[in-house]
Image (cartoon, helix red, strand yellow):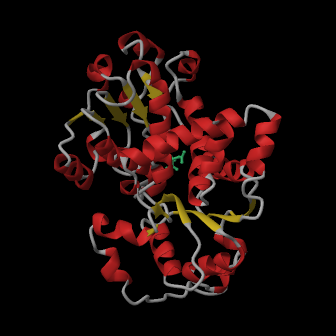
Amino acid sequence: MEKYAEQTQQEFEGWEEFFNKPVDEKVNAFRSGNRIYDVIYAQQFDRAFLDYLCRLADSIRLLAKTKVGQSKLRHLLPHKRAMLYFVQPSTRTFLSFQNACHILGITTSETRGTSTSSEVKGESPEDTIRTFASYVDLIISRHPEAGFAEKTAWVLNQTDHPVPVLNGGSGPDQHPTQALLDIYTLEREFRTIGGLDGKKIAMVGDLKRGRTVRSLSYLMKNYQDIELVYVAPEIFKMKDDIKEFLDKHRIPFTETEDFESIMPDVDAIYMTRIQNEYGSDPTSEAETFPQFHLRPHHLPKIQTHCAILHPLPRRYEIDIRIDKDPRAAYWRQERCGMWIRAALIAYIFRVDDDIQDELS
Ligand code: NCD
């Protein structure tokens, strides 16, 4: 579809001032009563919340095993409607949120690009989002711009008809619900070996532009005695803001380009893909950085309990022959995303107690 007009720029009084505050000072703006209302940054989650949400996801999962249980879940929120505003490519996050909504009986609408919305007429994204809030009870957004979900939630909260906003990925910045599902997966993979506390986790690949490793790193402050190993090519090293956060919270981390050397030491390996979409140099697109790939000959080097995760999509970072290894957790991780997102939405709409009651 042709674009008729340039996007209208709107200035919201107070936004710049709010945006420039440290996250710690902003989290209260996204709470309502004693609860999280909008999910914008991973820093909003504390240990009690994470543990609670993992238990809730387990309960939903258990109920969904039977027809009767699924029917009970579907009767929790049939009076609610959600909008999935996904204007950056997505497969898992979109589908898992959509199916999480359907599990709870929520009706969904979707926009998968700006080309068929009034944004081609020059409408600002803030007005577009405000329009969604006129029709639905929940907005889930994915956008190429860092800070997009934060701004739309902030703008909506100034209106007389706010609805919760869930950040399904905001540029190279944050992906808080991915971090939730990563935690849920790690907790499940480590269930028989004492959970996540005390574990050493390697994050591998494009740590500079990958938002999942950023959000997951923030969550590490909630666990005891965690150690992180960042394995990345020099040009894609983890950014300083995250390293400063880890220092502040006394979370030890090391950095290396020698992937093989750390393989025997870690309890989990979190693989990521090179995020070419954020690059401007076409010659670098062909480079797949094979030193940062996991291959079948590496499997004997890693511990027998080592969990292999990947937010997916993968390219060449994990050889498909690894999929059959019991330590390959990434397909389980994908399903965990649907259950933890259903738990999050149930919490946001305060039907979490009803779910726990069903099982007590
Ligand atoms: C990730 C993302 O979009 O940030 N994918 C996802 O949500 N599962 C990771 C990626 O695209 O590499």
- Residue 101 image offset from top left, x and y in percent: 69, 53
User: Residue 165 is drawn in which quadrant?
Assistant: bottom right
Looking at the image, which is closer to me, 301 or 131?
131
- Residue 182 image offset from top left, x and y in percent: 47, 39
Residue 119 seen in the current view = yes
Q: Is residue 313 left or right of residue 145?
A: right
Q: Is residue 149 left or right of residue 219?
A: right
Residue displayed at 65% across by 49% down: 354
Looking at the image, which is closer to me, 42 or 78?
78
Instruction: Note whether 4 is above or below 347 in the view shown.
Output: below
- Residue 40 image offset from top left, x and y in percent: 45, 62
Instruction: Note whether 214 is above or below 28 in the view shown.
Output: above
Question: Can you say which quadrant of the picture contains the C terminus?
Answer: top right
Question: Can you say which quadrant of the picture contains the N terminus?
Answer: bottom right
Looking at the image, which is closer to me, 247 or 45?
45
User: Residue 18 is drawn in which quadrant?
Assistant: bottom left
